Image (tube, rainbow, N blue to C red):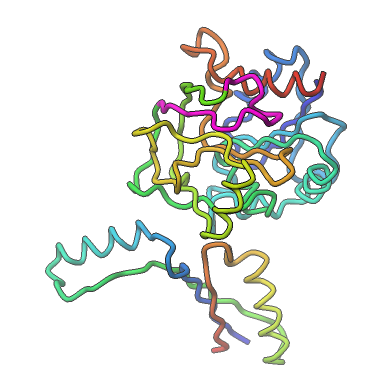
């Protein structure tokens, strides 16, 4: 089974990298860009076939390592 | 005073820390490789600076899940002094031994320079040799030193006096909230800081300001 984990910064946490990207996009002429927030994507392959079990295992992975829940949120997609 | 230094793949300030500890305590620190399960008997355990695991995932994130961390957490709970400098501070926050997180510097650049710090709480085992409000020099060298904590956490650590060092006015190099340079846990036996006191301990370094931190710990252990 394949899963995708998306980790994003929580609202209210400053994202200097996103700000820099925002500025660079503006410099390239994309004047439409309101704001950019940078995150991370993890594509994880799991051996099991049970979707619920996979979800709960992935949640554990996020809580224990993939995300720092002080500053980050995570979302899990089974793909 | 007996000391130990934990070494990870990618640590690079471990030798500076060894040197400073030996110079100030008069005895050789023990080196502990991150895959070991038990720390030696020590009054102070140091998590040194560097780029453990190449800062993969998040600075300090992988090192914080190393085998030796279990015993470090246990030792911290039992009251042993734990000092994390730079990457060591990042590792201690990732391990949950200290509140908050260290994010990319607000200016996005690696900063390698001298800053001034103010000791804002000298009633800790790490700062008793400073005078309250003392401004001292200390080098910094980091890319991810921008301290962040949510409002509730920030209010709690400020109220508890857990903020021990702040960047002196106008010298905040990384955008840290409330100019925070170093904090302790609630119990006061674990300190994390971004600046490198181990790099200002003898005349050859150009100053002795960093000694006071180690001398405070020696005093406590005596």
| Point 46% across, 39% down: residue | B142
| Point 37% across, 33% down: residue | B169
Q: Quadrant of residue B52?
A: top right
Q: In which quarter of the image is residue B41?
A: top right
Tell me: residue A18, above or below residue B109. Answer: below
Quadrant in which the C terminus of chain A appears: bottom right
| Point 66% across, 85% down: residue | A55
Left/right placement of residue B185 relative to residue B132 reads right
The furthest residue to the top = B203
Percent across and percent down for residue A66 are: 59, 67
Tell me: residue B132, above or below residue B147. Answer: above
Q: Give the range drawn in magenta.
A: B114-131
Total labels drawn = 0
Judging depth in this view, the residue of B36 and B176 nearest the camera is B176
Percent across and percent down for residue B2 are: 81, 23
The furthest residue to the front = B159
Quadrant in which the N terminus of chain A appears: bottom right
**Magenta span: helix, strand or loop, mainly?**
loop
Q: Does the magenta stretch include residue B11?
A: no
Q: Does the magenta stretch include residue B122?
A: yes
Judging depth in this view, the residue of B217 and B111 nearest the camera is B217
Tell me: residue A59, above or below residue B100. Answer: below
Tell me: residue B22, above or below residue B64. Answer: above
Percent across and percent down for residue B76 are: 78, 43
Percent across and percent down for residue B172 are: 39, 37
| Point 53% across, 50% down: residue | B55
């Amino acid at each position: 089974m394949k899963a995708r984990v998306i980790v994003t910064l929580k609202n209210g946490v400053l994202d200097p990298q996103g700000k820099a990207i925002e500025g660079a996009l503006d410099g390239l002429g994309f004047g439409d860009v309101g704001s950019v927030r940078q995150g991370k994507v993890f594509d994880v392959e799991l051996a099991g076939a049970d979707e619920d079990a996979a979800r709960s295992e992935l949640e554990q992975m996020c809580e224990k390592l993939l995300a720092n829940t002080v500053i980050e949120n995570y979302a899990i997609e089974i793909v | 005073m007996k000391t130990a230094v934990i070494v990870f793949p990618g640590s690079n300030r471990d030798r500076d820390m060894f040197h400073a500890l030996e110079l100030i305590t008069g005895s050789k620190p023990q080196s502990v490789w991150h895959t070991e399960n038990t720390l030696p008997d020590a009054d102070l355990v140091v998590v040194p600076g560097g780029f453990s695991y190449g800062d993969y995932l998040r600075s300090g994130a992988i090192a914080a899940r190393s085998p030796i961390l279990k015993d470090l957490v246990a030792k911290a709970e039992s009251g042993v002094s734990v000092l994390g400098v730079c990457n060591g501070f990042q590792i201690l926050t990732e391990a949950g031994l200290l509140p908050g997180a260290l994010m990319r510097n607000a200016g996005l650049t690696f900063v390698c320079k001298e800053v001034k710090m103010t000791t804002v709480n000298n009633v800790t085992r790490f700062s008793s040799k400073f005078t309250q409000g003392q401004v001292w020099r200390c080098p910094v060298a980091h890319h991810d030193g921008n301290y962040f904590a949510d409002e509730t956490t920030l209010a709690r650590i400020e109220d508890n006096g857990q903020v021990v060092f702040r960047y002196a006015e106008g010298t905040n190099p990384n955008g840290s909230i409330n100019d925070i340079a170093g904090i302790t846990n609630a119990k006061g036996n674990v300190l994390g800081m971004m600046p490198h006191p181990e790099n200002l301990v003898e005349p050859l370094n150009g100053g002795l300001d960093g000694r006071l931190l180690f001398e405070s710990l020696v005093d406590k252990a005596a």
